[in-house]
Amino acid sequence: MSLSLSADSPAVPDDADDGVWLECIECGETFAPFDDVRYTCDECDGLLEVRYADLPTLEDFDGQGQGVWRYADALPLESGVSIQEGATPLYEVPRLEESVGVEALRIKHEGMNPTGSFKDRGMTVGTAVARELGVGRLACASTGNTSAALAAYGTRGDMETLVLLPAGKVAAGKVAQASLHGARILEVDGNFDACLDIVQDLAARGEAYLLNSLNPFRLEGQKTIGLEILEAFQADYGTFPDRIVLPVGNAGNTSALYKAFRELVQAGSLEPEEVPKLTGVQAEGAAPMVEAIENGADEVRRWDEVETRATAIRIGNPVNAPKALPGIRETGGTAIAVSDEEITDAQRDLAREGIGVEPASAASVAGLRKLRAEGIVDDDERVACLTTGHLLKDPDAAAAAGAEPEPVPADTEGVLEHLQN
Ligand code: F0G
């Protein structure tokens, strides 16, 4: 089955619950959404998607509910375990816009969510589904942000949380969050992909409910990033953005945005040619999606060795690739790899505009700059870059990218003298 941008509405299967069901993207098998715990297809192990009998138009989001839950009509439940996630700023960045050289550049700063990353949008839905399913223990593998969100939303929903982190490769702010919100933290002697292999095994054995982005319900919450961007561009420019640039790790967000746009096409709110070009950015040391896009491959090759300063996207096996590759291709987007130096430069560029982001987030801006310089992005484009996590997530990276503090004596004369040098 192809995930194309078509206006065809799906047939509603018998196992739908209130117009909601799960469907395999590979073989089309359907499942009731909340009867059993299930992450992939029973028949072929393909990825699952949440499907709806009735899809809302943009006009249907009528201002009831806040943030993510303003879009409840596009979500599998009416309400969730909420800490007021979503409704993040879409900043103007005039100097950066001019130096990149595009018609319009806006920064969708997902670092302004309750735990400081876009993961909260997925967790508010994912933990609500976990409650619906009646599971006790939630688990995830994480490069950090998912673990922080899982810990906060899990405790808020009164559920136990277990997180598996790659030892020594998670930024300090994220471990601190998972810890204070009460997750049990297991530090694995391996990379993120090894952690995810283990969590998938634990979930298959019924030891915990998996809340990585392999879980189709998480992506439903993350669709709302795309809905907010479209509404804001329409209000500010009278058109939708030409392109959305985002960092890619497991490619969950890429898949979620594509799904949001496909559903709007089906609902009649968006023409296929109006869909923003989804443009993914990875770090050079962890770029399996970029490799697949460049080679025109149908599948992504798992990279066993990955390295980058942008530890959030230090991922070699993007599990959502079967959903995300069609998203990039069908929208006319592309994918590009950037160096750690380019990432840090972009982090500084954003910081100069007063926008503090962690390294992985700055990859979007670094990628846009590079694509513009290569002429792949045109000067007449209106672009939104996603910045996925807050600066304080990775204080060490921020301090290393910024200026050194200067020691001075504890008296005014000494300070003045120092300032003269
Ligand atoms: N940016 C940040 C700050 C992230 O934390 C992540 C993923 C991504 C981008 C990539 O998003 O997976 O949807 O392509 N972080 C996960 C985690 C893996 O465990 O926090 P994606």
Image: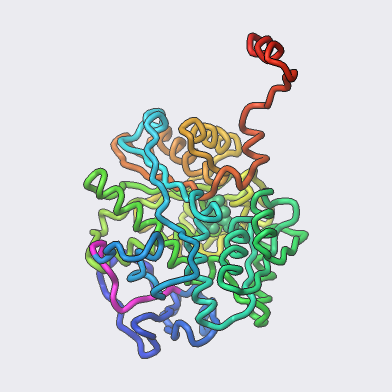
Q: Quadrant of residue 341?
A: top right
Q: Nearer the viewer, residue 382 or 106?
A: 106
Residue 2 included in the magenta stretch of the image? no
Image quarter of the N terminus: bottom left
Left or right of 318, for residue 416: right
Q: Position of residue 284 (x, y in %)?
A: 59, 44
Q: Position of residue 177 (x, y in %)?
A: 64, 56
Q: Quadrant of residue 325?
A: bottom left
**Residue bounds of the magenta highlight:** 49-59
Q: Position of residue 212 (x, y in %)?
A: 57, 66
Q: How many marks?
A: 0
Q: Nearer the viewer, residue 335 or 230?
A: 230
Q: How is the image coloured?
A: rainbow
**Direction right: furthest residue:** 189
On screen, residue 290 above or below 83? above
On screen, residue 105 above or below 16? above
On screen, residue 75 above or below 301? below
> Residue at left 59%, top 81%?
135
Image quarter of the C terminus: top right
Residue 54 included in the magenta stretch of the image? yes
**Direction bottom: furthest residue:** 14
> Residue at left 43%, top 79%?
22
Q: Quadrant of ligand 1?
A: bottom right
Residue 291 visible in the snapshot: no
> Residue at left 34%, top 58%?
227
Left or right of 378, for residue 37: right
Q: Nearer the viewer, residue 264 or 289?
A: 264
Q: Quadrant of residue 204?
A: bottom right
Residue 139 visible in the snapshot: yes
Q: Position of residue 78 (x, y in %)?
A: 39, 74
